[in-house]
Image: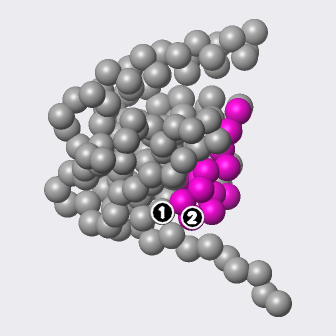
Amino acid sequence: MSRRIALLLLALLLISVVPTLAQDGPTVGLGESDTLGSYLVGPNGMTLYSFTPDPINTSVCYNRCAEAWPPLIVESADGLTAADGIPGTLGTTERTDGTLQVTYNGIPLYYWFQDTEVGDTTGNRVGRNWWIVPPATVYTQVMPTV
């Protein structure tokens, strides 16, 4: 039963996201929080997150993970735009299903299915693996010592 609820919530999120992707606004914009400061949002105004285990320019969030954390998907890398005040580089990474997920400075971007309104940031710190993405985030990855 909980799987059906999760799928229903995902469907509702996708219904709300897909029409906004066709709008003329930026692919990635800025949100603001008194406690968290500035952070990235998708074209629908919903908060975007990063996933700590993702290597640069690669998503490892699939199946059940991607049901809870839908990736920000675009039809093409052409026309990616960032709102004023967002330094850095937007790009895409190809997912295993062939879709293109938006990246920011190499960081794959996701939504959180439990955020229901613009300004929600309930996915921040989930499992200490999911984080809002502040503008000008620098991606770091721990390298194993030899």
Residue 140 visible in the snapshot: yes
Residue ID at (42%, 64%):
105
User: Looking at the picture, does residue 51 appear above or below residue 142?
Assistant: above
Q: How many marks?
A: 2
Q: Look at the image and give the residue range highlighted in magenta.
A: 50-63
Residue 7 % position (x, y):
63, 17
Identify the image quadrant of residue 146. Answer: bottom right
Residue under numbered circle 1: 106
Residue 114 % position (x, y):
53, 29
Type of secondary structure dominating the magenta stretch: loop
Q: Residues within 10 Å of mark 2 (few under 14, many from 20)?
A: some
- How much space separates mark 2 and mark 1, taking CA atoms? 5 Å
Which is nearer the eye, 95 or 50?
Answer: 95
Cβ–Cβ below 8 Å for labels 2 and 1?
A: yes
User: Looking at the picture, does residue 9 appear above or below residue 113?
Assistant: above
Q: Which mark is residue 96?
A: none
* N-term mark: 2 or 1: 2
- View extreme (right): residue: 146
63 to the left or right of 134 = right
Q: Indicate whether residue 5 is drawn in magenta.
A: no
Residue under numbered circle 2: 56
> Which element is circle 1 on?
loop
User: Looking at the picture, does residue 12 appear above or below residue 63?
Assistant: above
Residue ID at (48%, 44%):
101
Identify the image quadrant of residue 55. Answer: bottom right
Q: Residues within 10 Å of mark 1 (few under 14, many from 20)?
A: many
> Which element is circle 2 on?
loop
Q: Indicate whether residue 56 is drawn in magenta.
A: yes
Task: Please name the amino acid that badge 1 sits on.
Answer: Gly
Residue 49 visible in the snapshot: no
Residue ID at (35%, 53%):
39
Residue 1 % position (x, y):
75, 9
